[in-house]
Image (cartoon, helix red, strand yellow):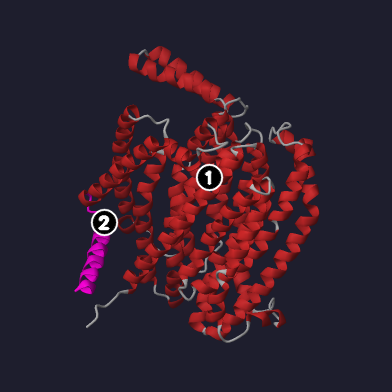
Amino acid sequence: MKPRVTKKATNRNIVFVIMFILLLTKFLGFIKLRIIAQLFGASRELDIFWASSTIPDMVFNVLVGGSINAAIIPMLADTLHKKGKPDLNKMFDHLVIIFFTVFVLLGAILFVLTPQIGEFLTTSGTFKGFLSMGDNFDAGNLDLFVKLMRINLVAPLILGISGLITAYLQNYRKFVITSLAPLFYNLAMIVGSYVLVSYFDMGVEGIAISTLIGSVLHLLIQIPLCRKTYKNGDIRNMIKIRGAILDPDVLKTVKLAVPRILGLLGEQINIFVNTLISFTLSVGALSSYKFAFSLHLFPVSIVGSAIAQVCLPELSEQGSKGDYKGFKKTFNEAIQFSMYLVLPIVVILIILRLPIVRLAYGTGAFDWQATLLTAWCLALFGISILGQTLYLIILRAFYALQETWLPLLATIVGVIINLAISYYFTNFFSHYYDWRIILGQILMQMGNADVSQLMEVIKSFFMDMGVWCTTRGDSGLAVGGLALGMSIAYFFEVIVGFVLLNKVRKIVTWKKTIRPLFIKLLNSLIMGLGMYFVFKLFDLELDTTRTIQVALLTTGVAVYGCVSYLIGSKVFKIKEFDIGISMIKDFIGKRKKRSE
């Protein structure tokens, strides 16, 4: 008799397969950014490229990102479960028509208005004065900005259709092919960027064209499986379908998507404002921020996205059936599993931020100053990694319950906090070498226990903080304020998300949710303290001017940290550790049986 394979075990296996594919994808992403760093460093030309892609990315993230997880996947699951495949295919047809039409119209409008958008950014005295932009982004950059933005507007149209196909396939649990699409996207960008820039001397335009090529591959890799799964119908006939807008399922999908679209619009406004603020800072600040942003997304994209991707169809099915006991169990297992995997990665990224940045990007035009700024941002992104991973799963729980308005409140809180922190702490960190001196004096006088002088220095420090938070200094470390703003914003979004989720269904509890998280966090802190002392010890002994020595230092300290984390997991009796050991034993047992 064959051993019975549970659905839970199957889901975990799928998660690990997807995590492996996403790991390869992120590795290619690092190669992509390393090539870009080597070719351009943290330069103004590259800053303009990132800025030109902000609005096209906003269009894609708001319309597609705001709809797929919030409404399309839950509604497709609901339609498949209650009405069957023919109605599912009909709904999919209508969604493709609507999204294609919206993207074409919106893209055409933005294409025509691109020069006006660029002129507004470069010539609006009121706008530049509000952000203290000065002449850092002047009219001389306008032609390049317009050209790049127009190229970047095409990719969202292709990625939008590809995203709909991804949602359709994931309802049939076709996770592998949908996970391979971003891998091919990154592969196209690696080859395209290097060839077009190095051999055809196209500058940053070569990166924009590579993005377009990557989006085409993102779509093409999914089409064969989509045609096979679609079966009863010809995808080419979708253009002949009438009444897409009046389809009641489509109308319900739009209704569910609107709150998330509004929320993502706020988040994209955050990104847009942060991009503009970065132009008030030193040259290359935006590029350093973007490089750190990509590194901090490593655990979010691999762990958080994989688990959220797999659990959403299951949560949607349980919500549709009214199986709230199973829903609660699935949700809490996803939360605990994701945190168990992501916490050690976060600790490694924070403790080893400098050598990791050097290994990832330290080549060509990427100099030591760019390394320091990128590592500084990466450290401040730490809390954001945890917040984003948790919030990915919290949002999926809301979407599976077909509740999209409540998470909008959490997003609004996050947007407001992010804008405030980004502005004030960008200013604060721009005075880094001023307040660091006073903070050093406070720590020194605390040791000498001179109470009267200590209180005077502390009072002066807090008085000066008001000035530092509202005026701009000259330290390049000001860019850290953008990273800190995102971290604090996500921390509050998670808290508000937990509270609001319990208003809908009581699924967040002390015993199943909060207490296990505290135990995992304590284990991670112990791991981090040990890693810090080991890192400092070996940093003194090794010649870190050589890449091989940096790689040895990073690998050695990371391995020590992982071993420490596993030992702590055993000591604290963390459930996920025991599950992992069981899975390894099962895998070894199966291999032995096959060999016999």
Circle 2 — which element? helix
User: Which callout, 2 or 1, points to the residue nearer the camera?
Assistant: 1
* Quarter holding residue 482: top right
What span is colored magenta in the figure? 572-596
| Left or right: 237, with 302 as reference point | right
Q: In x, y percent, where is residue 409?
A: 55, 55
- 408 to 522, vertically: above or below: below
**Residue sitting farthest toward the left:** 596
Task: Report if residue 118 is visible in the image.
Answer: yes
- 539 to 58, vertically: above or below: above
* Quarter holding residue 468: top right
User: Across the whole image, how many numbered discs are drawn on residues?
Assistant: 2
Q: In x, y percent, where is residue 417?
A: 55, 43
Circle 1 — which element? helix
Q: Report the magenta stretch's main SS.
A: helix
- 69 to 551, vertically: above or below: below
Residue at the image position 56 percent from the left and 42 percent from the top: 37
Q: In x, y percent, where is residue 218?
A: 58, 64
Q: Amino acid at mark 1?
A: Arg
Q: Amino acid at mark 2?
A: Phe
| Left or right: 287, with 307 as reference point | right
In this view, the residue in front, 24 or 410, is: 24
Marks 2 and 1, the one that precedes in the sequence: 1
Magenta-span inclusion, residue 591: yes
Residue at the image position 40 percent from the left and 12 percent from the top: 452
* Quarter holding residue 582: bottom left
